[in-house]
Amino acid sequence: MPQIFLNRMIANKLPAVGRVGLGHLLTPTGKVYSELTFVRLAEDDFYVTGYSNFQLHDLRWFNEHMRSGEEVEIEDVTSSRAVLFINGPNAEKTVEKLLEEPVDLARTSFKAFQWRKLKLSGTETIAVRMSFIGEHGLELHVPRNQVASLYEKLQMVDPDLGNWGGVAMNAFRIEKGVPLFGKDITKDHDAWEAGLDRFIKLEKGDFIGREALAKVKEQGGPTRKMVKLEVVGAENLDCVGNEPLRCPETGTVVGFTTSGTWGCMTNKSVALGYVSGPERWVDGHRLHVDLLGKRYDVFVREKAFMDPAAVRDRKAAAARAQTVVTSTPPSSEQKQVPMHAASK
């Protein structure tokens, strides 16, 4: 059964039918081998996507770890499929303009980590409600030979639609503390160090790397950890990755950056990296980072510099609810209580 095989491959639980989930392939030592998205089309049918340059890398891992007697058929559709990311507050409205029949794409009904099959102006599409950059939007998985046509049609129905590239993606994701596999997370890091706790389900039973991760947890957890970083005082300079992080008092290297950028929404120089020692993981802890031969202050931040769009929406809705004050005129039988304001 495919679900038995895949469940043994990843540390997370598989999503239910109609849902989407993130799962990580781990080595026997608990290191992160790859990161994959699982779209569960049916009980025994999974559409699995990963990083394009990891196609053969992931396929080899699956084939090498398939046990005798497991009835699993793997079809590599990398050459026949493509993905368009469409993000922003009007992403759904733009997609709706190409629908051949009405489909409810409202965020209240088509929620995060769900998928739907759509027909967009003749193109059979798997629309996935998720966003790597933490902004509203959809992933549109389409046949490769139709992706150019769909791209052009999206541009035609929405003249405000623009292109965004790697620099923008980097800024959006790092501001929200989203690590990139292959850069922030590699086979040099175990899943605990990489902060993948919410994707690790030790209680689900056997999976590759489980024993190693359980041992680390029993011994008190990892000795180094990925942290969010804010660089201060380095005008016109940002981290890019692999810069040493030092103890300010001794100059000893205690970690390293993995990626960095100028946060275009937060107006801060932000980065991700690994730091050894739990005492250095606390919010506000000061370190030094080497940039072009000089050392600058860098501070560990417990929380991401910016909330994802969905969290911002929930906070805004809660704030609006708190400002709504309803009052009814008292009846003649109700006692009037004078209110007094006092200031100190």
Image (tube, helix red, strand yellow):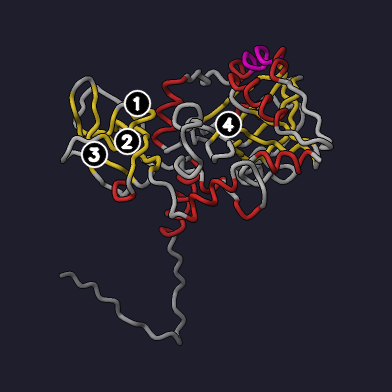
**Residue at numbered disc 3:** 287
The part of the image, by quadrant, that contains residue 82 is: top right
CA–CA distance in space, label 1 to label 2: 9 Å
Q: Residue at x 45, y 54 (%)?
A: 219
Relative to 206, is 133 on the left or the right? left
Residue 280 painted magenta: no
Q: Is residue 126 visible?
A: no
> Left of 256 or right of it: where is 214?
right
SS state under label 2: strand
Q: Is residue 152 magenta?
A: yes
| Residue 101 rendering spot, x and y as whole percentages | 77, 30
Q: Which residue is label 1 attached to?
A: 242
User: Where are the magenta residues, as a range?
Assistant: 146-153
Badge 2: residue crowd in 10 Å (few <14, some 14–19, many ≥20): many
The amino acid sitting under disc 2 is: Gly
Callout 1: helix, strand or loop?
loop
Compare marks 2 and 3 and give the one earlier in the sequence: 2
